[in-house]
Amino acid sequence: MWLKPEEVLLKNALKLWVTEKSNDYFVLQRRRGYGEDSGGLTGLLVGTLDTVLDSTAKVAPFRILHQTPDSQVYWNIACGASLEEISKHWDWLQQNIIRTLAVFDSGEDITSFVQGKIRGLIAEEGTSASDEEDPERFREAVLRFELLFGVPQREKLVTYFSCSYWRGRVPNQGWIYLSTNFLCFYSYMLGNEVKLVYPWDEVSRLERTSSVLLAESIRVCVRGEDHFFSMLLRLQQTYLIMQQLADYTIVRFFDKETFNAEHPLANPLHVTQRALEIHARNQSFRAFFRLPQEENLCEVYESFLWVPFSHVNTLGKICVSENYLCFASQDGSQCHLIVPLWEVFSVELPDRSSRALTVCLRGKRALRFSEVRDFERLAATIRRKCRTAGSPQHFISNPDEEGVMVGQSQAVSTEALMNVFHPHDAENLDPKMLKERMKEQSWQIHFAEYGRGTGMFCTKKTRDLIVRGVPETLRGELWMLFSGAVHDMTSHPGYYGRLLEECMGSSSLACDEIERDLHRSLPEHPAFQSDTGISALRRVLTAYAHRNPKIGYCQAMNILTSVLLLYAKEEEAFWLLVAVCERMLPDYFNRRIIGALVDQAVFEELIREHLTQLTEHMTDLSFFSSVSLSWFLTLFISVLPIESAVNVVDCFFYDGIKAILQLGLAVLDYNIDNLLCCHDDAEAVTVLNRFFDSVTNKDSPLPVTVQQASSATANDKSIQKVDISNLIKEAYEKYGDIRTEEVENMRKRNKLYVIQTLEDTTKQNVLRVVAQDVKFSAAQLDELYMLFKRQHFVSCYWSVCSPALQNHDPSLPYLDQYQLDQSQFSSLFNLLQPWTTHTHARSLARSAFRLLDENGDGLLNFKDFICGLDILYNKSFTEKLTFLFKLHLQPDSAEDGVIRKCPERGRAKVDLQEYLKQWQEDLQRREGNIKDLPRINQVQFIGLTKTLYGVFHGDEEEESLYRAVARVTSLLLRMEEVGRKLQESSPQKTPQSTPTSTGEGGQPESPVSQQETAPSHSDITPTSTSRPSTPTSSPTGTSSPVLDTPTDTPSSPSTVRDGDWSFSFEQILASLLNEPSVVRFFERAIDTDSLIAHARKNQLKDAH
C-alpha cells in the first residue's frame, strides 16, 4: 500500500534490508529473513524477531524508497506484504512517474512532486479510511484499556497501536494506548507481564531515534528514565499523535496564558485523533501564512498557479479558510500568496479540459489555477465565501495622513515617530540617501512586478531584498504585511480605540511596571525624550496589558515596542506587538519566559549540529543560552545599535525565529577563533560584547545624533568594523538551509524538556526547604512530592478548564506554586494516612485540613501537607496524640473548604518582611507548650474516642486497644464526677469552675444529669463492662482531680449545667500513658515506602 512519505534513516537500515530493484529515483527493498537468501545471522535474527511478534506489529517485508537525486535522503513511499503486491506499485511508478521526473531541474523539485503524487494516491484510495474504522473493535479496546490500567471511565482513549517495548535488549510485544492524559503500554508474554502508565505531564523527552538493533523507534523519557517503543507499522503517525497529546497537556496544565475555555480542545472528554489532527493542521496553516487566530483551514486543493513574472506554472496547494485564499508552492520556488476573499469579485472557469479556474481580484489582477482535481467545487466555495467574508475596515496606511486619530478619548498618533522626528528629505543628495533611494526604487519595481499589499507574491527575490535591508519609508508597511498584523487590524476595526477607552484611568501592577520602564526605552533617541513618544509607548503597552492580562507587561516589551513605534503608526505598533507576543514569539513574555528558554534549547541543539569545533571546546553550552537570552527577548535590539538592529527586525518579521537563530549562529561563527581562546565565561562575554560594539550599518540614512554606534569603537581604527548587511547575508548563506518546519519540531521537542526542567527546579527548592523540618528520607520526600503534585493534576484531568488549575501559579514562591483544596487533600490524605480506613475517614481528613490550613485561605501547600503527615508517620506518641486532640478542637464551619485566596495573588510583589514574620510565628507555634491547649468538651471528646476506635480497627491487638480506651474513658468520667462533687460540697467558697463547654463546648441539645453521666459510657465504649477505677492521683501530679478544673473565670454553680464536662490534654495524655498497648500502637514504626507505593498504585482508582 502507498504510505505518506516519511524520511528514512539509512544509517543502520542497510543491515536489515536487501535491494531487489533500483533506478535513478526509486529503490525496491526486501527485508532480510524473507524469501531467498534468508540465511545468515542477521537474516535469522530479523526473521525470528518479526515472526514471534504480533502480526499487526510486523514490519512489512517489502518497501519502495524514493531517493532525492544527488542526495543521501530517502523517503519511504510504499510497503507490501508480498513481492506481487509491491511489484504493482513499482510498475505503476515506472509507467506514470519516471518520464515526468526528467522534466525537473533540481532534486528538491523531484522529491516535492513525488510526495505530492503519493499523497494524492492516498487521498483517492483512503478518503474515508478513518471513518470506516470498526467502532465495535474500538469499544473493545476502550474496555481493555479501562480494565488493564484502572483509569476512570471518563478518561478518553484517543488511539492504540501494536508495538514492542524494549526492556534492555529484550522486546516485549504488546499494545500502546494513547489517551488524553496518559501513555500506557501492556504486554503479557510467557508469563512476563509489563504494564506502564505514565501521565503526559511527566514526560520530559519525546523523539524519534535510530540504532542498530531497533532501526527506528520512539524514545519517551519520564522522570529521567528512557523508554523505547518500536515495530510500529505507522511510526510517524504514532509519533505525531504522541507529540500532539504531550503538547496539549503542556498547554493545558503549564502554559495557561494561551489556554482558556474557548480553546478548540478545551474539553478533554472530547479529544479525538481527528480533533488533534485538525487542531495541528490549523495551527500550522495559521503559522505559515501569519493569519489571525480565528482562521481555520477549511479546504485544500493541489494545483498549478500561473506565475506571471516567471512565466511558468508553479505546483503547490490552495488553502481556503473562512476569509482568505492562500497558495504555497511545493517545487522549491518558495512562492506563497495570501488573498483576502473580500478582494475577490468573480471566479471564472475558462478551460474545463485543463480543470482551470481564474480568480479575478480588485485592481485588475487575476490568478489562474490549473489541474485542480475538484475545480468546480473550489469555484463554488470561493464564490460562497466571497459573499460572506467581511469587508475590510483598515487598509495600508496613507503616507500623507498626519495628525491624531479623531473620535478617540485619548489622542492617538497616526504618524510613525521616525517621520515626526526625522522627516524624509527628498532633496538630500548625501551618498547614504542615494543608496536609500535605490533601495526604494528596487522595492517599487518589485511591487510593480509581484504586487503590493496583502496580495503580493512572496518569493526568493523578496527575501533577497529583505536581507539587503528595508528602506526607512517602507519599513512599517512591510513589517505589518510580513508579520500578518495587517490581517489582525483589518479584522478588528476600532478595537485599539475601544481598549484605550476601557483601560483609561485604570490602575494595576502592570501599569506601575510600565510607568517604571517608560524612560528606559531607547532613552538616547529624541522620540523618547519627549512626551509624544513616551505617551504613545504608554498607551500601546497599557492597551496590550488590558487586552491580555495573563501576560500583562513583561520587561523587554518596552524596548521592542519603542522600536515598533519608530516605524509604524500607534495602532499598527499595537498590532505588531500582538503578532510578536501571541504568534511569532509564543510564551516569551510571561513570568517564566518559557518560549525564550525553549528557543535557547533549540539554539544549543543547532550549535552542536553546525559549530562542532565550538562544541568540542566547550562541554557545557548553557553559557551560550544565558548570554544569548537578551538576543532572543529583544531581537538583538538590546545588544546592537538601533540602526543595525532594525535590519534584524526586518528579517525576523519575514522569516520568524529562524532568522534570529541563523544570526546567532553567524555571530558565534564569526568569533569562533576568539571564543576558542577564552579560558572562562567572562572572557567569552567580553569577546561578544566587543564584537557587537563593532557592528555598524554603513548604509543607514539616520542622522548621527540618532545612531547608537559606540563612539569609542568608531574612533578606534584597530577594531575591525562589521557591517550588519554583510553579517545577515553571511547568516543566510551559511545557515539558510535550516527549515522552518525543522525549527518548529525542535521547539516542540525541547518544550517538554524545558517545562520539566523548571518543574524539577521547583521540586528541588521545595524539598530543600521542607527536608529540614521532617524526618522523611530524600527519596520518600521526592515520591511524596510527586504524589502531591499528581493529586493536583488528577483533579484537573477530566474537567473543562478546572478551577483547580488556578491553584497552580508559577509566579508564586516555590512552596505555593502547587496547592490542594479540601477535596484534593482528603483524597490524598486517605491514601497516605497510616491507619486502617474507617467510617470516620472523611471527617478526619476534613478536620486535618482545617488544622493544617493555618492561614485560612482554603488551600494547603506541600509544606503544610508534609508537616502534618510527618507527625502521623515519624513523631512521638505525645505529638501524635496532640495532633488528634487538636483535630477535634476544630469548630465546624459552613465555609469549610471555601477558597479565600486573592485573585491577584500571583501578580503581587513578594513581601520578604511578611515572610520572615510568618516564619517567626511558625517557630513560636512549634515551641508552644501542651499546657496552652484548650480543654476538650463533651461532644469533642466523644469524637476523639470514636476516632481512636476507628484508628484501632483491624489491628491485631484491636480487642486490647478497645478495652484500653474504655478504661481510660471510664477513668476520666469518674474523675470528672469526683471533681463535681467536691465543688458542690463547698458552697461557701466562690466557685471558680468554668468549663470550656460553656462557650462552644456546652451543647444545650444534650444535657444529661450527673446520675446519667456514668451510663453514657455505652455511647463511647464498645462494651458496657468497664472496671471501676479510683482516681488516686491526678494526671498532672496533684492529689486531686479537682485542681484540674480551670479557675480562670468565676461563675455561679447554678450556671453550670449538670451534664457539662470537659478534659484537659494533660489528663487524657496521662491516662493513655498508663495503657502500654496504646503507647505501643502509636510508637510502632510505620512502613512508609509501602504506604507510598500503595498510594501511587491507587491514586487513579481513587479518582473514579
Image (cartoon, rainbow, N blue to C red):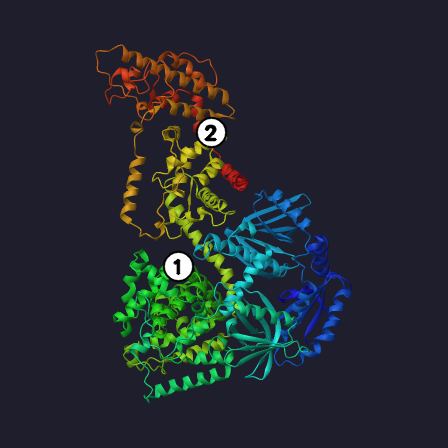
> Position of 949 compared to 1001: left or right?
right
Picture layout, residue 864 above or below residue 711: above
Q: Is residue 669 visible?
A: no
Question: Nearest the camera: 176 or 819?
Answer: 819
Is the residue under label 1 in contact with that under label 2 (CB below 8 Å)? no
The quadrant of the rendering that contains the C terminus is top right
Image label count: 2
Tell me if mark 1 has few (under 14), some (14-19) or many (20+) residues whose alpha carbon lies within 10 angstroms of its own: some
Tell me which amino acid carries mark 2.
His
Q: Nearer the viewer, mark 2 or mark 1?
A: 1
x, y (%) of residue 788? 45, 43
Where residue 454 sits: x, y (%)? Answer: 48, 75
Q: Residue at image x 37%, y 83%?
A: 699
Q: Is residue 1042 left or right of residue 1104?
A: left
Quadrant containing the N terminus is bottom right
> In the rendered image, which residue does mark 2 sit on?
840
551 to 872, vertically: above or below? below
Regarding mark 2 in the picture, which secondary structure is present there? loop
| Residue at the spot 42% in from the left edge and 16% down from the top edge | 1016
Q: Compared to 1088, does 413 lie above or below?
A: below
Q: Residue furthest top?
A: 985
Amino acid type of the residue that numbered disc 1 sits on in the rendered structure? Asn
Judging by the rendered image, the residue that carries numbered circle 1 is 548
